[in-house]
Image: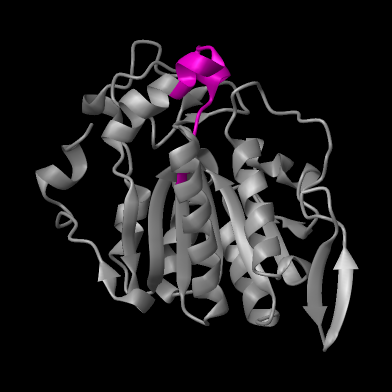
Amino acid sequence: MTAPVELEAEGRTIYRRPSLLSNPTSYCPGCGHGIVHRLLAEVLEELRVAGRTLLVGSVGCSVFAYDYLRLDAIESPHGRAAAVATGVKRYRPNNVVFTYQGDGDLAAIGTAEIVHAAARGERFTTIFVNNGIYGMTGGQMAPTTLPGQRTTSSPSGRDTETAGYPLPVTEMLSLLPGVWYAARTSVSDPVNVGKTRAAIKRAFEVQLEGHGFSIVEVLSTCPVGWGMTPSEAMHRLSDEVMRAYQTGTFVDRARRIVQDLPKPGTPRSITEGF
């Protein structure tokens, strides 16, 4: 990522600096955001669209993406990234537009925005980093926190009797006809990092092909919020989180892939794996 990147523009070959900046990281040791940033930069450069890509940021640890990605960016109010991205993409349809959001931003305060943007089939991409906790604001329980998981707002562990079950956001969205691509991946090890890169690339390809909404949910870690070392957090991601959250491609309508998911509302769809 240190060499100049060759791009085509109006019949000319131009050069620009890499999309990934070399700033010292502010993320906690073991955090997965840096991995996802690297993958985003690689994919956008490979697709030769970095120069016309617009990032819509959210609130939370994900907001620091501005510090590491050399992209034009817009900050949105908490939870409203999908609404802002809708306006940006409709006004500038030739730009590549994506939101970069965490689970607190997307699955809590931003639930309505992401659901309705997906239902409308808005032509932007969402990168959804799910570490199952509010990392920036003190480690509180998030909508994606697993049952029994201890947080600062559930010190005895998430109780499904009072707090309900985690939201399987990507499966929910994949049921909507406006969603053209939906996948869940992980950064637990090199093999899964490679799968995450492929999913991110495919999500942007769907947008470039002119189709509707695309989303990649990336299962990640929050060692500080989880009260673990970076190594322990990676093991938990592989051994516990990935058992609860199914990974894979749920829908790729351009390639006529629609995974057979549980029907919404059945006990299996909200309890299996949790």
Q: Which residues are magenta?
A: 218-234
Quadrant where the C terminus is found in the figure: top left
Is 70 magenta? The answer is no
Q: Quadrant of residue 4?
A: bottom right
- Could you tell me residue 227's position as x and y percent? 50, 12
* Residue in the picture at 54% in, 74% down: 207
* Residue in the picture at 71% in, 45% down: 65
- Going by the image, does 177 lie left or right of 232? left
Is 223 magenta? The answer is yes
Against 227, residue 125 (above or below) is below
| Residue that protrudes farthest toward the bottom in the picture | 11
| Residue that protrudes farthest toward the left in the picture | 267
* Residue in the picture at 32% in, 74% down: 177
Near-viewer residue (163 or 55): 55
- Going by the image, does 253 lie left or right of 47? left
- Could you tell me residue 75's position as x and y percent? 73, 53
Q: Quadrant of residue 188?
A: top left
- Could you tell me residue 154's position as x and y percent? 39, 17
